[in-house]
């Protein structure tokens, strides 16, 4: 999977059932997948609001940065791509 985790892959594809199952089974919600960041970043940058909410509810670090891409955060990604619902969700949850 090119360094990506199953949780990351399910988050990218917006597969809620898989995300829930992986989290229930102890998947590392904050695992960095190299230059692609975390599952939270993946979901935020693709407009998958329900996945973002699930990840946050399960301890995803809201201000995780992608080191390889100028330290971009999920909030920056969601807001720069026009995902207002995710931007609001992240801000409401304390994103900086």
Image (spheres, rainbow, N blue to C red):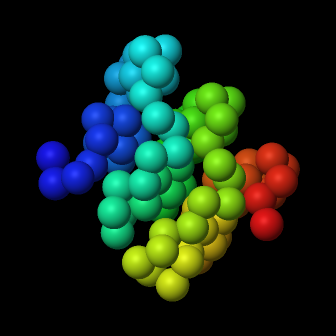
Q: Is residue 10 visible?
A: yes
- Give the residue drawn at x 46%, y 21%: 26
Give the total of numbered labels: 0
Q: How far across and how far down the image is residue 60, in percent?
A: 61, 42
Query: Above or below — where is 23 with respect to 45?
Result: above
User: Residue reaching furthest left?
Assistant: 1
Q: Residue at x 52, y 45 (%)?
A: 30
Q: Position of residue 11 (x, y in %)?
A: 40, 41
Q: Position of residue 22 (x, y in %)?
A: 40, 22
Horizontal arrangement in the rendering, residue 56 relative to residue 16 (left or right): right
Residue depicted at 65% across the width and 49% down the height: 61
Residue 86 placement (x, y as % from top left): 65, 53
**15 vs 72, nearest the viewer:** 72
Q: Is residue 35 above or below residue 19?
A: below
Question: Picture quarter containing residue 5?
Answer: top left
Q: Is 75 on the left or on the right of 51, as rendered?
A: right
| In the image, residue 5 above or below residue 41 | above
Of residues 66 and 11, the one drawn nearer to the viewer in this rendering:
66
Residue occupying image coordinates x 45% and y 46%: 31
Can you name the residue that lies furthest to the bottom here? 70
Q: Is residue 59 left or right of residue 17?
A: right
Residue 53 seen anywhere in this rendered image of the structure? no
Q: Quadrant of residue 59?
A: top right
The answer to which of 65 and 45 lies nearer the viewer is: 65
Location of the C terminus by quadrant is bottom right
């Amino acid at each position: 999977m090119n360094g990506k985790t199953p949780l990351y892959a399910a988050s990218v594809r917006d597969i809620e059932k898989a995300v829930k199952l992986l989290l229930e089974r102890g998947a590392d919600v904050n695992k960095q997948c190299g230059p692609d960041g975390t599952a939270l970043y993946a979901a935020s940058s693709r407009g998958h609001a329900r996945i973002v909410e699930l990840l946050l509810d399960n301890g995803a670090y809201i201000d995780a940065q992608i080191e390889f891409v100028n330290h971009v955060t999920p909030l920056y990604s969601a807001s720069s791509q026009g995902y207002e619902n995710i931007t609001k969700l992240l801000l409401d949850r304390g994103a900086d």
